[in-house]
Image: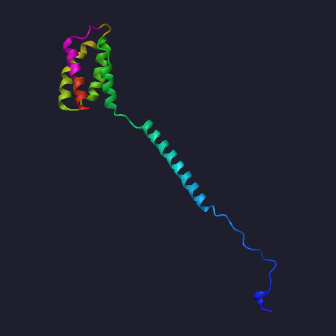
Amino acid sequence: MNPSDIPIHDIKPLMPIPDISVYIFIALIAASLLVATAAAIFVWRWWRRHKKADPRITWLKKLDKMDLADAKRSAYIMTRYGRLLAEDKRRQEILSQLLPRLERYKYKKEVPPLDEETKRFMKLFIEMCKDAL
């Protein structure tokens, strides 16, 4: 008898195996894109929340919003933020002319209202700061 003619009874025929590796690969790519997108959104929101604003802009807003009817408070606000915003020669010069005018509105219990020339100096200084920023 020929060995190829012997029937083998213990070995079963090959079973077809479904190939789902393509689907697993696509699912992994989709999951990684989802995680990457979520991470990018998280980082973007965190950065927007924690980025530092230019402090000069906030100081200028405070100067712009101050009430000129309250002379004492306006003098203190202008002195404080004016010194911080006077960075170039022109603004320092205007501020050096403005600070002696503001001295009579500070350190007293009762102060007179701001005179028009002091208001003009204050407005000029604020406009110069706006132009510089």
Q: Residue at x 25, y 28 (%)?
A: 130
Boundaries of the magenta span: 111-124
Residue 90 picture location, percent across and down: 17, 29
Query: Which residue is at the front of the view, 40 or 67?
Result: 40
Residue 42 picture location, percent across and down: 49, 42
Q: Residue at x 20, y 32 (%)?
A: 88
Q: Quadrant of residue 118?
A: top left
Q: Is residue 50 magenta?
A: no
Magenta span: predominant SS is: helix
Residue 97 picture location, percent across and down: 18, 21
- Taking the view exactly as shown, the residue that stands out farthest to the right is 9
Q: Residue at x 80, y 86 (%)?
A: 6
Q: Residue 111, relative to residue 128: is it above or below?
A: above
State the quadrant of the N terminus.
bottom right
Confirm whether residue 107 shows in the render: no
Residue 23 picture location, percent across and down: 60, 58
Q: Is residue 116 magenta?
A: yes
Question: 86 left or right of 13?
Answer: left
Q: Residue 132, relative to residue 112: is it above or below?
A: below
